[in-house]
Amino acid sequence: MPVTRRRFAALLTVLTAGATGVLSVATGQQTSAEATQEKGPTAVLPASVTAGSVVQVVAHPDDDLFFMNPDLSRSLLAGTQVTTAYLTSGESDGRNEAGGGQAKDPEQPADRTHYAEARQNGIRSAYAQMATGDRTSAWKRTVIPTDGGGRAELDVLIAKPQVNLVWLMLREARSTGGDNPESLRGLWDGRITALEAQLTSGTPVKQPFSYTKDQLVQSIAGVLDRYRPTTIRMQDPTPNRYGDNGRYTDHQDHMYGARFVQAATAAYAAQVQRRPHFSVQSYLGYHNSTLPHSLDPQTAETKTGYLRTYAWQDHQDHCGSPSGCGDRKVAGNPTGRNWAQSLRYTRADSTSWLTQGTPGRLWAFAALDGQMAYWTRGPGGDWAGPVLLPGTGIDPGAATARLPDGRIAVLATRTGFGSVPADYRRDVVYAVQAAPDGPFGPWQSLGTPERSDQEGTSAISAPAAAVDAQGLLTVYVRDSRRTLRATAQLPDGDFSPWQRLGGDDLQGDPVTAVDTAGRRHVYATTTKSVLAWTQPAPGSALAGPSPTGLPATTVPLSAAPDGAGVRLYFRRPDSGVVRTALVTAGPTARPQVSSVTEAGGRAGYGAVGAAGRLVAGRGENGTISTTGLGGPPAWVESRMLFAGAPSATLEPTGTTTTAVLGLDAELHTTTTPTTPTTPTWHRAVR
C-alpha cells in the first residue's frame, strides 16, 4: 500500500477526531458539538471536527476513485458516514481484459454480467482498503426496494458499517459519446420511455426491472432520503465541448447521470421536510487529462494505489468470485488519462462568498438545499443563520459584491429543468439588499451569453462581480467557448447585452478585484498561464486580454487587493504549494507582474482564501488549514474536512476572519488576531 506509515499516522491523528461527531442516519443523534452547545448559552464553542454524512452518486464503478479521490478516502479515514450509489453497472463491452495500450484478445467472449460483477468486486476491495486497510474486509450484501419501483443491491462494510454501497444497476451507454438511445442520455431526452436494468452475475437482485425518467429521479431521491446526507457529491452535469466539433469533454453517462442527480436533489429537497441541510459538490471528469496535475506526487500515488486494488492488478484471487476480483481494463493504466493525478471541482471554487457590509457586520453565503443561504455576524460578534433566500435551483458556489452604501449583492448561477428536456439551462442570477443590513430582494436573472443548453449555455462558469463608484455592477463569466464575457449595469438598473472580452482557453472561474487607485482587475487561468484584463485608469474600459507571463497553475485562482495592485494566489502543479504574485496596472495596456513567490503551505489542492497575510486552504491532509504570506512552508492543519473553498476578510480592527462550509453543511469560522496565533475553528452558530 503506497501510504507511508508516517503519513498514515498523521492522517489518523488529524482526522479520526471526526469519527465521534458522525451524524447517525438511523437515530438522528446529535453530534458531540451539538450536545455541548445545548448545555447553556454561555458554553464555549467546541473546536470543529469532521462531522456530517456524505452521499456520492456516480455513473460507473470507478468514477468515484478517479474523480472524487482523495476527498473520498479522507472522508472514510475520518470515520464519516459515506454512501456511494452507482447508477449503471458499467458493463461496457463485457470483456474484462487489461487495457492501457495492450492488445485486446478478439477471441475473448463478451460477458457483461460477469464483467459488471468484477467491477463491483474491485470497488468493494478498494473501499475496504480505504476504510480499514484490508482489501478483503467482508461485506454484507442485501436487496432493498427503491422508490422507483425496482430493486437495488445494498452492500454494508461489516467492520465499518457507516460505509455503504448502493448498486442501481442500470444499462450503461456502452460508448463515451456515441448516439445510443438505450442510455441515461436517451432516457433524459425522452428518446426511450424506460431504461432496462443490467444485473450483475453475483448480485442478490434477481428480478429484472426498468425505470422511466421520473422513476429514476425518485429512486435517487429515495437513496438521499434513506441516508439524509449533509454533503452530496456528484459528477459534472454541464461539461464543456471540444472546439467546434461539438463533442463533450466528458462521458455521456457522467453528464446525464449528474443531471438525474440534480433533479433528484431538487425532488428530495422539496419532498422531505424534516431533514438536515445539505450542500452539493460537483467534480470535473475527463477534462482533467488536459490540465496540469493538481495533486502532489505522494497523494497521487496513494490514490493510484486504490485504483490498482480496484483493477485487480496483482491478479491474486482474494475475493473468491468466478467473475474476477476487479476491473482489468484499468490494470494496464491505473492512472487513467492523467485522471489519478488530479481532483477538481466544477462549482463552489469562489473565495469571495464572505464579505463585509456595514461597519462591524459580516455576511457569508453558500448554496444549501438548492437555495442560497446566508449567515450574518453583527458588531456584537455573534453569528446567526442560516437563512434561506426564496427561489430554488441555485448551483453550488456564491460570489458577492459590496455596494458603496454597505448593501450586499449576492450572485450565483441557477439551473432550471423546464417541462421538456430542451428547457434545461443555466442562467446568472443576483439578489441585492433593499437597504444596508436589510432583507434581500428577489432573484433577478441576467440570462446567459448563449441561447440554449445544446449550444453550451449551461457550461458557463460561476460569476465574478465588480462595483463602480456609482454602485453599478459588472458581472463576468467564462462562456462555453472558453472566452470572457461581461454584462454591465446601466444607470436605469437594466443590464447591457453580454459583451465579448476575448481570451482563449480559459479554465475555471474568473476573479476580479479593485486596487487602491480604483482600477479594476479581472483574471482568468488558462492551461499554461494567467490572462489579465485591467483598467488603465479608474472608470476606463478594460484593456486586455494581456499575458501575465505567470507559470501554469492548477486552475483555481484567488485575487485580493494589495496596495497599488492586486495579489493573485494559486497552486503549483504537481505540488499543491501555494504561490503568489503582485500585479499592478498602469497607463500601458500590459500589467506589471512581480516575481512569483511561495506563500507558504505544502501540498493540498483547490482554491485558497487570503486576506491580509493569512492564507487558508486544503492542507497536506485535506483539512482546512492556514499559513502566512511569506511564512513557514507547512500548513497549520485543523481536524476538519470541508466542502467548496474557504473565504477570508481583513477587518478594520486588523483581525482576519476566515470561514468554510464543513461536511456537516454548517458554517465554521476562525478569527486570527493582528499577531498570528494557531487558529482554532468553531461552528459559527450555536
Image (cartoon, rainbow, N blue to C red):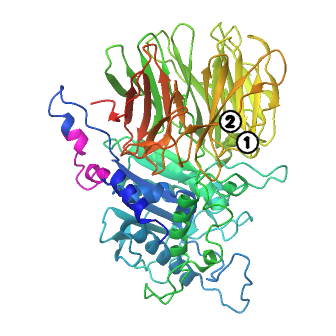
| Pick the front one: 681 or 630 | 630
Q: What residue did someone put label 2 on?
A: 596
Mark 1 secondary-structure assignment: loop
For the point 56% across and 80% down, the residue is 313
Mark 2 secondary-structure assignment: loop
Q: Which image quarter is the C terminus in?
A: top left
Q: Residues within 10 Å of mark 1 (few under 14, many from 20)?
A: few
Q: Position of residue 41 (x, y in %)?
A: 18, 26
Q: Residues within 10 Å of mark 2 (few under 14, many from 20)?
A: some
Q: Position of residue 606 (x, y in %)?
A: 56, 44
Whether residue 676 sits left or right of residue 306 in the image: it is: left
Whether residue 381 sits left or right of residue 123 in the image: it is: left
For the point 35% across and 57% down, the residue is 12
| Pick the front one: 201 or 668 | 668
Up the image or down, 544 lies above or below 608; here it is above
For the point 77% across and 44% down, the residue is 455
**Label 1 – label 2 distance at C-alpha:** 9 Å
For the point 79% across and 20% down, the residue is 542
Q: Quadrant of residue 125?
A: bottom left
Sequence order check: which comes first, mark 1 or mark 2? 1
Up the image or down, 100 lies above or below 24; here it is below
Amino acid type, label 1: Pro
Up the image or down, 653 lies above or below 116; here it is above
* Residue 9 visible from this viewpoint: yes
* Residue 212 visible from this viewpoint: no
Q: Position of residue 191 (x, y in %)?
A: 67, 60
- In the rendered structure, which segment of residues is drawn in magenta? 17-35
Amino acid type, label 2: Val
Marks 1/2 in contact by CB < 8 Å: the verdict is yes
The label shown at residue 551 is: 1
Q: Position of residue 434 (x, y in %)?
A: 50, 11
